[in-house]
Image (tube, rainbow, N blue to C red):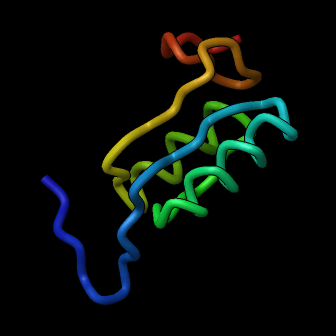
Amino acid sequence: MSVHTPQTPVVDVLIAEDDAPMREGLRQLLEGRGYHCVEAADGLRAVELARRCPPRCVLLDLAMPGLDGGGCAV
């Protein structure tokens, strides 16, 4: 269980997507509706971000470099 402290930002959505235009478009769409988003271009970075600032929701591409959406190293 993680506890948010004043130093830990609340993350509504973690966008894990290796296609940059898709990732940017999703972020703009969600932030335009008031959600706070973070982005990861590969699976390893997504795991790092999720551990640092646990998100409320994850939009996960299942085929990414480094670590794919199924949790298998590629």
- Position of 52 compared to 56: left or right? right
Q: Position of residue 29 (x, y in %)?
A: 64, 50
- 69 and 24: which one is in front? 24
Residue 43 position (above or below residue 46): above
**What residue is at 46 percent from the left and 49 percent from the top?**
13
Q: Position of residue 53 (x, y in %)?
A: 40, 61
Residue 36 position (above or below residue 23): below
- Position of 71 compared to 44: left or right? left
Query: In the picture, which quadrant includes the C terminus?
Result: top right
Residue that lies at the very extreme toward the front in this rendered image = 33
- 6 and 71: which one is in front? 6
**What residue is at 76 percent from the left and 44 percent from the top?**
25
Q: Position of residue 19 (x, y in %)?
A: 83, 30
Q: Position of residue 41 (x, y in %)?
A: 74, 39
Residue that lies at the very extreme toward the left in this rendered image = 1
- Position of 9 compared to 56: left or right? right
**What residue is at 39 percent from the left and 52 percent from the top?**
51
- 36 and 73: which one is in front? 36
**What residue is at 17 percent from the left and 68 percent from the top?**
3
* Quarter of the view holding residue 20: top right
Residue that lies at the very extreme toward the bottom in this rendered image = 6
Residue 71 position (above or below residue 5): above
Number of numbered markers = 0
Residue 9 position (above or below residue 2): below
